[in-house]
Image (spheres, rainbow, N blue to C red):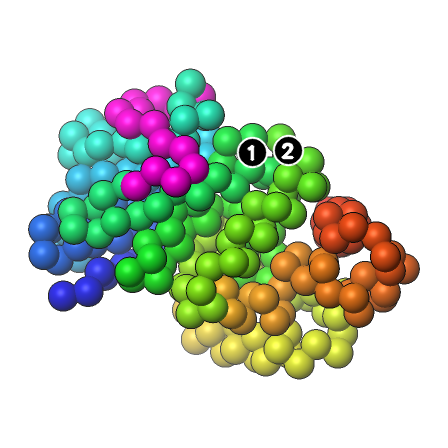
Amino acid sequence: MAAQTYLFPCLNDNFGVLIHDPQSGVTASIDAPEAAPIEAALKKTGWRLTEILVTHHHADHTQGIGELKNNHQCRVVAPRAEAARIAHVDETVGEGDTVKVGGLSGRVIETPGHTAGHISYFFPVEKLAFVGDTLFSIGCGRVIEGNPEMMWHSLLKLRGLPDDTQFYCGHEYTAANIRFAKTIEPNNQALAARADEASRQLAAGKATIPATIGTEKAANPFLRADDAEVAKSLGLSGSPAWKVFAEIRERKNRF
Ligand SMILES: [Zn+2]
């Protein structure tokens, strides 16, 4: 049986997500924004928590770890570069490392920029990616600890995943991201289609994720900073893509 995922809201606008291997019964929580909704998700699914895979050290991704570890004695996997800032870590990982979730095999991709040691987890067989606060649907994380060039290269790594990869991010920011994206590419048809889809999802009380890398490549301005038309519309023709990215990020910060 294929991997199963279960997505649910945490805190104000965070996502919680579980990935479960039915064969082995192993279940990982991606990050731990808040213990109670994760416990509720485990109860609802009947899955037993065995792992927590941490993307970065921010409190809204880690503050549930202590309670969950206490309740389930689960293994906590975290980015090597941030392990000192995350409590209860059992195993640290970096670029190219493999993380086993029962019979499922995830690859660690270092995606610094939002934080200096941020990592993402990619399961190539299942075509699932867990990208924390690096990539959002039609947006990206704020560049807090890194610099725009670093963040652009991290986004390029995620953009390079197969188009049909479904990715899960840390927050439900899609509607606001779409409002901003339209100011960068008002005539982007893929963006218009994604906007319609997201409106329908939100109106039905559903999450707007997972989304696919293929859709993001066509519609997310932060992944399109090397598109000549995007650069031109920002008055940055001929500039390196990361500078175009930096301008888009700066405009979003002020939006
Ligand atoms: Zn964060």
Please report the residue visible at 53 percent of the width from the left and 51 percent of the height from the top.
Answer: 157
Q: Quadrant of the N terminus?
A: bottom left
User: Which of 1/13 is in front?
Assistant: 1
Instruction: Tell me the quarter of the picture where residue 179 sits.
Output: bottom right
Q: Measure how far apart labels 1 and 2 are at the Cα level.
A: 6 Å
User: Which of 230/142 is in front?
Assistant: 230
Q: x, y percentage for residue 209?
A: 44, 64
- The secondary structure that dominates the magenta segment is loop
What span is colored magenta in the figure? Answer: 85-98
Q: x, y percentage for residue 84?
A: 42, 18
Sequence-wise first label, 1 or 2:
1
Q: Is residue 185 above or below residue 40?
A: below
Task: Please state if 20 lies on the left or on the right of 204 as rendered.
Answer: left
Q: Are marks 1 and 2 in contact (CB under 8 Å)?
A: yes
Residue beneath disc 2: 146
Please report the residue visible at 66 percent of the width from the left and 57 percent of the height from the top.
Answer: 222
Q: x, y percentage for residue 12?
A: 48, 48
The residue sitting at the right extreme is 235
Q: How many marks?
A: 2
Residue beneath disc 1: 115
Local SS, label 2: loop
Instruction: Inspect the image, locate mark 1, and give the three-letter code of the amino acid beneath it.
Output: Thr
Q: Quadrant of the C terminus?
A: bottom right
